[in-house]
Amino acid sequence: MTNVYGFAAAALPALLFTLLSEIFNAFLHLAADAAASHGLLHVSAGLLNALITALSVTAAGAVFLRPAKRQISLWKTTEDKDNAVKGEEEIPRSVKAVCGIFGAAALALLLNGLLISTGAVGRSQEGTKAAAAVTAAPVFAAALLYGIVTPFAEELIFRGLTYSGLRLKNYRKPAAMLTASVLFGLYHGNLPQGIYAFCMSMVFCEAYEESRSFPLIFCMHAAVNLSALAVSYGGLSGLFTKPGWMAFLCAAAFLCLFAAEGFPRKTHG
């Protein structure tokens, strides 16, 4: 029974964050509609949706900021109970971090290509709608939202609170990774994005497990989102569905993530 309570306590922030962000989003849309009906709002629909999403995610994330900061600090200084203490690293941690970031971006582009080439995105009405909403926003707004705001808030909740919360309650790494990743996939609200988010979350969880570095997983998440944005705005989505490019991305993701060697682990004196 204690394990059940511990599991629920660790998973609850992710569920509440999802609920709160949807509530804030709905409220802000109602307020925007009311303002527009009175002629008080004159912005494009794409920019308005981006602003509302940014405000909703920020407000929902702010609710959990204080407990997340405490837990991130605790996780950063907690010894890894599943792995033996590592000796001196042959590759500098900064190099490993860069490899992890580039590897995650390559994997994200590969997954996008696979989802497009298999028709998973086209068959999902919600997935198509979500993809269209991203590129409907001006480039600067999309870059700010998906390159800074959402990566920070999502990592704060799904890795900073949920994943590390489960690990600190002595749940095994696979169970914690699966739980955080399933919740992260469900949070995205449609099947194509859910599959994509689940896979990327597994990589982020592994990176957080090994490095105990929140800045690293934030940078990885931001790089993943910005690379996908660059492809979408550049009209290059079809390019990465070609077998040659997919093979290149597969090799790049494997080599970079392998070079990261489990990602840079911080040492504590």
Image (cartoon, helix red, strand yellow):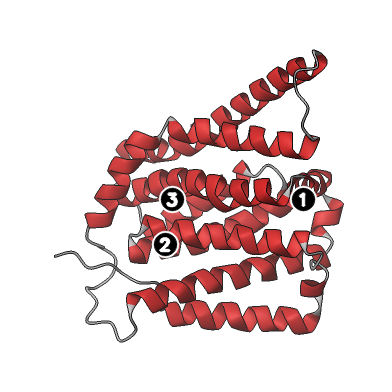
Q: Which residue is mark 2?
A: 216
Count of numbered circles in the view: 3
Percent x, y of residue 40? 75, 18
x and y, in percent, of residue 65 in the image: 38, 36
Determine whether 230 is above or below 160 in the image. Answer: below
Disc 2 marks a residue whose amino acid type is Leu
Return the residue at label 1: 135
Query: Where is the N terminus found, in terms of image quarters?
Result: top left
The structure residue drawn at horizontal position 34% and vertical position 65%, both measured from the top left corner, is: 211
What SS does tag 3 mark?
A: helix
Q: Are marks 3 and 2 in contact (CB under 8 Å)?
A: no
Q: Nearer the viewer, residue 198 or 234?
A: 234
Give the amino acid at mark 3.
Arg
Q: Position of residue 44 (x, y in %)?
A: 79, 35
Q: Is residue 210 left or right of residue 206?
A: left
- Element at badge 2? helix
Label 2: how many residues lie within 10 Å, few (<14), some (14-19) or many (20+)?
Answer: many
Give the label, 1 or 2, closer to the camera: 1
Q: Nearer the viewer, mark 1 or mark 3?
A: 1
